[in-house]
Image (cartoon, rainbow, N blue to C red):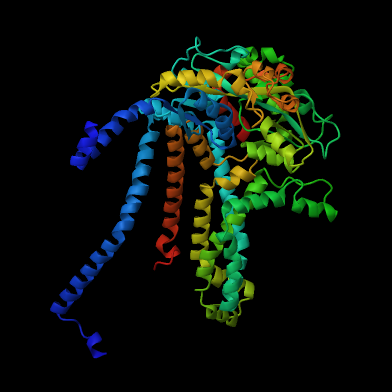
Amino acid sequence: MKIDGANMKHPRHARSATLCVLTLAAPAAWAQDLTFTSYGGTYQEAQREALLDPIEEEMGITIREDTLTGIAEVRAQVMSGAVSWDIVDLGLSDCALAEAEGLFEPLDYDMISTEGFEESAYSDGWIGIIYYSTALAYNTEYIDTYPASWADFWDVEAFPGARALQNVPMGNMEIALIADGVAMEEVYDTLSTPEGVDRAFAKLEEIRPDIDVWWSTGAQSAQLIADGEVDMTSIWNGRLDAVQEAGVPAELTFNEGLLSLDCLAIPRGAPNAELAMEVLARMVEPDLQANIPGLINYGPTTSLAFEEGKITEDETAISPSAPDNLAVQLPISGDFWAENRPAIQERWDAFITR
Amino acid sequence: MIAIDEAPSDGRRAATLSAETREQWSMFGLALPALLIVGFLVFLPVGWLFGLSLVADGQPSLVHYRRLLEPAYLSIFTQTFQISFQVTAMALLLGYPLAYLLSQIPRKVAGLLMICVMLPFWTSILVRTYAWMVLLQRRGIINGWLIDLGLIDRPLSLVNNYTGTVIGMLHVMLPFMILPLYSALVKVDTSLMRAASNLGATPMRAFFTVFLPLSMPGVIAGTLLVFVLCLGFYVTPALLGGGRVIMVSMKIQQNAAMYFDWGAASALGVVLLAATALLFWVISRVTRIERLFGGS
């Protein structure tokens, strides 16, 4: 009532009073907000619908969004002490590298449940949110015998056809060793020795003359297989889905595929770290993760998501982390690559340019 | 008429001089914004990059340059210069006859043909590169025709390799060769050719002893322009090289964007810049460079 009186007598004071109220109220409202940053595009749209929308409703908060392209931006924010992101989505090797560089807040595993997670799918500073596969795909139009393993891919006599692989060491070193007969569970033990790295490069040397294209972007690998420029290639499973939807007779086998993941993490010094921990814990729970495959074909990181009844049989069949598919694949070790990438990359560059 | 022949008095000479100085100053004033932009946007960043290339882990260091001597980097430099050289040579071989033709036919027809030369020049480099991909693919249009005509049994590897890169770059570079060539060739006085044949030279001889030497400024300008532009190519080799062709600019991008290694990227940039400057210097020793671009 007093304010009302003041209002009528001194309109100017009233305005500043309103301003005061606004300024006081604002931080309280913002404390219930946080910023989630991911790779944008259809991927982030799916994350919005599957994870963020339900959480906003449940918790009564607002989640703002931003996009990034990789570790460099997170590093820049943390180093400069001007962190504006609360939860970030990064690729596996970036997660492992960022953790090693101390860019993440430690996660509170009293709050975050890892039930149904592979042991390689979480760490002190990050936890996986989706799986994708780098698997062997082939176009059935021009070849009669279809490869079913990396050993077949290497066998150019029995499986003739043009071939492509990705132009990065990560994944290809593992593929080479598997093709050379190393059991999947022993791949990283082997790769951790200098002899193992030599062995992988020797095997790659063997197939090099028969690789027509070393692809560098996901779109390129899809174009290669769709146009019949190559008959078989390693490809990300989501890209092959798109190729198939376009009517191209292409197939993919998850057998000996490499599982990679995107992780969630909280940058060190995040403005709303406490709330971020709560939201992050909720994001990785099976009932929300189960929303993702219906929107975009990335696999949940907890196997419990497949028991929620939300993921259809068709979606399960092509999901990179459905239990049957998971069982025949090798999860890529982020730690191995965080530690060894620079050295192996140098050697890879020499291998490619020679 | 008489006044011009007369030596100007001292007073008039001074007046002319000060007018000249004033004009020079106003010219400088007009050029100042451009000079500032060049200064701030070219020299400062280049200087900064140079500084970055000499630092590793916060210490002054030559490690980024030492790394360039490793086989992987040496082969990237070799490949970059080899491709640039080949593309330049082929652009000259293809461009010279065309520029010669354009310089000899009536201006109106030449103008029309020139539009054909310029059309690709005005098209996005990305579009053209993808177009070549479609044309050159294993199951692309060119291989399709060759197989239909019975000329080959199995598709040729025309793209995703060295060949595809050279074809794509050549297409992009041709106008850069033809334009300076043409502007030099139209300036050659054709009566000199007639005089040569009048004196008994065969057309061949007249061309090689009279026309070709007179067209050299155009040849050098075009060659230099194309070669230098080739050295910095990125999009075409990245898309048509199939991962096997790695040019210096691609390595710079990889170092800067993928590994966040600005020191290594800067060292590469500095060496590429130095190589280009050296090239300019060598050519400026054999010819007067300002003449190549229309100066006298």
Is A234 or A34 nearer to us in this picture?
Answer: A34
Is A54 above or below relative to B273? above
Residue at the far left: name it. B11
Q: Quadrant of the N terminus of chain A?
A: top left
Is A42 or B198 nearer to us in this picture?
Answer: A42
Residue B202 percent across, percent down from the top left:
63, 76
Is B23 or A314 nearer to us in this picture?
Answer: A314
Q: Residue at x 23, y 64 (%)?
A: B25
Q: Residue at x 66, y 15 (%)?
A: A187
Q: Is residue B189 left or right of residue B105?
A: left
Please identify the quarter of the rendering in which residue B66 is found.
top left
Q: Residue at x 50, y 69 (%)?
A: B183
- Count of marks overlaid on the render: 0
Q: Residue at x 57, y 12 (%)?
A: A114
Is A49 or A183 nearer to us in this picture?
Answer: A49
Residue A51 percent across, percent down from the top left:
56, 26
Q: Is residue A342 visible?
A: no
Q: Is residue B218 visible?
A: yes
Residue at the far top: name it. A110
Q: Is residue A13 left or right of residue A295?
A: left
Residue B264 percent across, percent down from the top left:
45, 33
Please identify the quarter of the rendering in which residue A296 is found.
top right
Q: Quadrant of the C terminus of chain A?
A: top right
